[in-house]
Image (cartoon, rainbow, N blue to C red):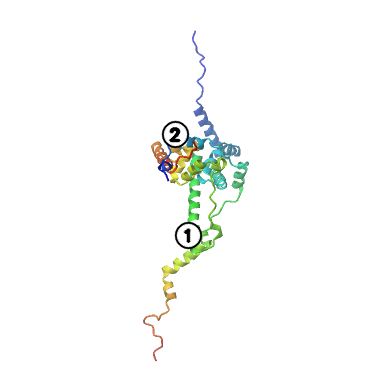
Amino acid sequence: MLLTDDPPAAPCPLSLAAEAEAALVLQLQQGSETAFRTLVERYQDRIYRTVLALLRSPEEAEDVAQEVFVEVYQTVARFRGEASLSTWLYRLATSRALKSLRKARAQKRFAYFTSLLGFDNAVLHEKPDHAHPLALLEDQQQLRLLLEHVARLPPQQQVAFTLRHEQELSYEEIAAVLSTSVPAVESLLFRARQTLRKHLSPPFRHV
Amino acid sequence: MSKSALRPLSDEEWQDLMRQLRDQPRPRPRPFFYGRVMARLAGPPARAVPFGWLRRPAYAVLLGALVLALSGDDKALSSTGPVPGAASHPAP
C-alpha cells in the first residue's frame, strides 16, 4: 500500500512570525489604527524597559517611549523591512534614549557653567538623579552599584550591556540594533563586563 | 582598606549578580500608555523656535560679550586716555 497522503509539514514558527510581522507592517503603512494599537501593546513594555534602563527616570522613560511610537507612526511608510520590526523599534528607542542622555548631560554642564558665572537661571537647574526603580524596589546595594557603573559606561557598551542582560537579546539581535557585527558586540560586552567587574567589589558576608 | 575589598568579582559572584539583575521585577509603563501616545499624535506638532537659545539670558549675555570682544569696541569704550594724534585743544 502506498502512502500518498502524508501529513503536510508543520509550518516553521519563525516564518509564521515573520509573515505576521510583515502583515502588521503592511497594515501600519495603510494607516490602520488597529494595527498601530496592536504594535504599541505588543512592544510598549520592552521599549519602556529598555529606555528606563538607560535613562533611570520613569518620567523621562515614559516620555521617550511615547516619542518612539510617535516616530514609528509618522515614519512607518518609509520602513522597507531591511531589519525586523523589533530591531527597528529597539534602534529608535536606544538612539532616542542616548540623545536624551546627551541633552541631560549638556544641561548639567550648562547649569554648572552658569552657576560659576552667577546667573540664576531657574530653567537650567540640575534635575535630581533618580535611582533605578528596580534597585529601589529591592534595595540591593550591589545591584544599585552595578547600575550606577553601567550608567558610566561609554554609550555603545551601555546599550549592548542593557540589551543583553536586561532585555536578554541575542548577540545577533544586538548587532542588528547597533548596526554592527557580532564580534563587535562581543568586544563591547567583554569591555563592559571587564570595567564593571573591576569596579564592583564582592559584597561583605557575615560568617 | 584591605586587599580583599579591592579584588574584582569572581566568575561565580558575577553570575550571581547577573542572575539578580534578570530576576528583578519588570517595570511597566503606567496604564493607558496607548491613549497617551494617541493624544501626543493628535496634539499640535512641536515647532522649533528659530534662535530659541537666545532667549536664555546666559547665552544672550555671552553672545553680547563675544560680539563686543571681537569687534574691539570694548577697548575703545574702556580707554580713558587721549586718542593718539588727536589734539586736546583746537589750534588757534
Q: Amino acid at mark 2?
A: Glu
- Residue found 51% across the figure and 27% down from its top: A13
Which sits in the foreground, A118 or A29? A118
Q: Which mark is residue B12?
A: 2
- Residue found 45% across the figure and 38% down from its top: A174
Q: Position of residue A199 (x, y in %)?
A: 43, 44
- Residue found 50% across the figure and 55% down from its top: A108
Q: Amino acid at mark 1?
A: Phe
Using a 10 Å C-alpha cutoff, classify the residue at mark 1 as few (fewer than 14 neighbours), some (14 to 19) or many (20 or more): few
- Residue found 53% across the figure and 61% down from its top: B56
Residue A80 visible, this orientation: no
Residue to which mark 1 is pinned? A113
Q: Position of residue A201 (x, y in %)?
A: 44, 42
Which sits in the foreground, A21 or A184? A184
Looking at the rendered structure, the secondary structure element under dot 1 is: helix
The chain to which mark 2 is attached is B
Looking at the rendered structure, the secondary structure element under dot 2 is: helix
Q: Residue furthest left?
A: B85
